Image (cartoon, rainbow, N blue to C red):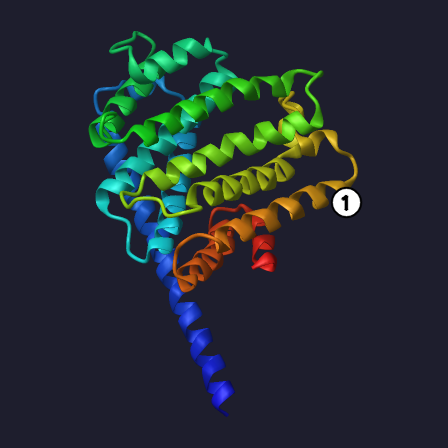
Amino acid sequence: MGKLIKKIRDKIKFYLFLIELIFKFFRQARFYKPYINSVIKYIDKSKISEAMMSEMTTIGKGVTLGAIALSFLRGYKINENERKVAMLVGAIEALYDGFFDDFSKDPERIKALVYNIENSDDPYEQLLITLSKELRRLKPIDQNPEFHKTIDLIYNAQVRSLKQKDLSTTIEELINISKEKCGYTVILMRYCLENPLVAGERDAAYSFGALMQLYDDKQDVLVDSRRGIRTFATEIKDSEEIGRIIKQAEEEAVDKLRKMDYPMKNIEKFLLVIPILGKITNLDNSASFKNNK
């Protein structure tokens, strides 16, 4: 009887936790647009495509939800400043992707827009400049060196990702390119939070991000193929081999997450959050992550 009561109690706790998480998702959705619109109020948004604005919103919410999930590790909620930083990071990531993948801008020009150029007649460039200025206001370079170093690592990863269109790039290189792109992004998500990283957390964040990108590559095979973007999933025809690569990344991520210097109950809660967030944000493959807990 005691075991049954405990099982019922655990179920109730889980569903209350799920309701809380869904509430946070919709609260974040309401918070995003008013804040970003206040930052870019002087940008002529009629010159920015609806597709880009939509992508900025999607990735902005996604990065913020990632930061919220990572905050479960420390055991207390994300604050307003952390939320704003995460939203800016997501919006800038969307522009980075557009500049590298769709607009084919010179990589050095893109980097300069984030740190050195003050104005531009190009509305997309001015959008990136404006968002970057606000990010530096909230996260000054001299006070947050690791945060801004990680932005540079993401930039370098984006430059290397241009090799995804090169037929001479090997499958091993494609896997490393994928891992780098999202691995450093999740590290940056973590740096959106103000508490210091604990032992092993940077490695765990990288491994977790790498895994998320492999899930994404597997899910986006048709889209990437149409765009001429090569990933391990577009090049490997054996589904069992794709599954093996992802399984290995799952085991590595879970192992590193469990070794972090956080209370185990916080780590378990984070592991519980991931498949739920995957369902909320339609990253369905992340649901398999729970099987490795």
Q: Nearer the viewer, residue 152 or 10?
A: 152
Q: Nearer the viewer, residue 166 or 50?
A: 166
Q: Is residue 50 visible?
A: no
The residue shown at (42%, 75%) is 12
How many badges with numbers are in the image? 1
Describe residue 3's horizontal placement relative to residue 137 as left or right. right
- On the image, the x and y values in percent for residue 6 come to 46, 82
Residue that label 1 marks: 240
Q: For numbered disc 1, what is the local secondary structure? A: helix
Quadrant of the image occupied by residue 175: top right
Please, what is the three-letter code of the amino acid marked with disc 1? Answer: Glu
- On the image, the x and y values in percent for residue 265 come to 41, 64
Q: Residue furthest front?
A: 199
| Location of the C terminus (image quadrant) | bottom right
The residue shown at (58%, 38%) is 216
- On the image, the x and y values in percent for residue 100 come to 49, 17
Describe residue 149's horizontal placement relative to residue 213 as left or right. left
Describe residue 163's horizontal placement relative to residue 27 as left or right. right
Describe residue 71's horizontal placement relative to residue 259 as left or right. left
Check the image and report above or below for 87 versus 125: below
Check the image and report above or below for 53 versus 272: above
Check the image and report above or below for 102 versus 72: above
